[in-house]
Amino acid sequence: MFEDEFLMKKIILSVLTTLALTVSIHSVRASENLKMIEGAIESEALSIKISKDLSGIITGKVCQRCETQVLKITPATQLFIAGKKVGLTRATTQSGKPGVAFYDLKTRLVTRIKIY
C-alpha cells in the first residue's frame, strides 16, 4: 500500500510540473506579442487647463522628484469623476484634485481622465 501511495504522489507531481512548465512557456510567448500602447500619469494634483473648444493640457507629477509631464487634451478626451462619465466641460473644476490621465504613447493625446 505504501508503494501505491508513493507512486501516485510521484505521478501527480510529474503532471503538475509538466503543467507548470507548459503555462510558463505560453506566458513568455504571450508577453513577447504584447505592445504597450497607453501610458498613465497618476498624480495627487492634476493641473487641467481647457479652452472653450475643449482642447487643452493636463500636467502632473508621478512623484515629488519626477519631472512634470505635459499631455494634450482634445474634444475626444473622456472625463470620469468618482467613476461616472461626465462632460469634458467640467474638467477645469477638477484641476488640483488627485486622479489619473491615460494617454496614447505615440501621440501623447489624453484618452481619458479619472478624478478620484
Image (cartoon, helix red, strand yellow):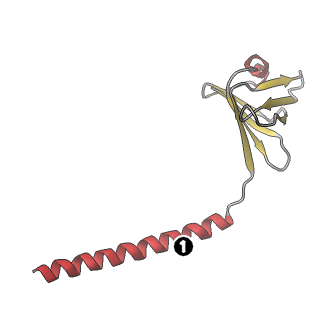
The residue closer to the viewer here, 105 or 79, is 105
Left or right position of 91 against 57? left
Q: Residue type at mark 1: give it.
A: Ile
Name the outermost residue toward the top: 93
Secondary element type, mark 1: helix
How many other residues sit within 10 Å of disc 1, few (<14), some (14-19) or many (≥20)? few
The residue closer to the viewer here, 74 or 69, is 69
Q: Residue 84 placed where, x, y %?
A: 62, 27
| Residue located beneath label 1 in the image | 25
Q: Residue 41 placed where, x, y %?
A: 73, 37
* Residue 45 seen in the figure: yes
* Residue 114 seen in the figure: no
Q: Answer with the quarter of the image where residue 87 lies.
A: top right
Q: Answer with the quarter of the image where residue 59 lies.
A: top right
Left or right position of 73 against 33? right
For the C terminus, the image quarter is top right
Is the residue 77 above or below the residue 35 in the image? above
Left or right position of 74 against 35? right
Name the outermost residue toward the left: 1
Residue at 16% from the left image edge and 81% from the top image edge: 4
Is the residue 30 above or below the residue 62 in the image? below
Q: Residue 72 placed where, x, y %?
A: 86, 35
Q: Residue 22 placed where, x, y %?
A: 48, 74
Q: Answer with the quarter of the image where residue 61 lies.
A: top right
For the N terminus, the image quarter is bottom left
Residue at 84% from the left image edge and 50% from the top image edge: 106
Name the outermost residue toward the front: 65
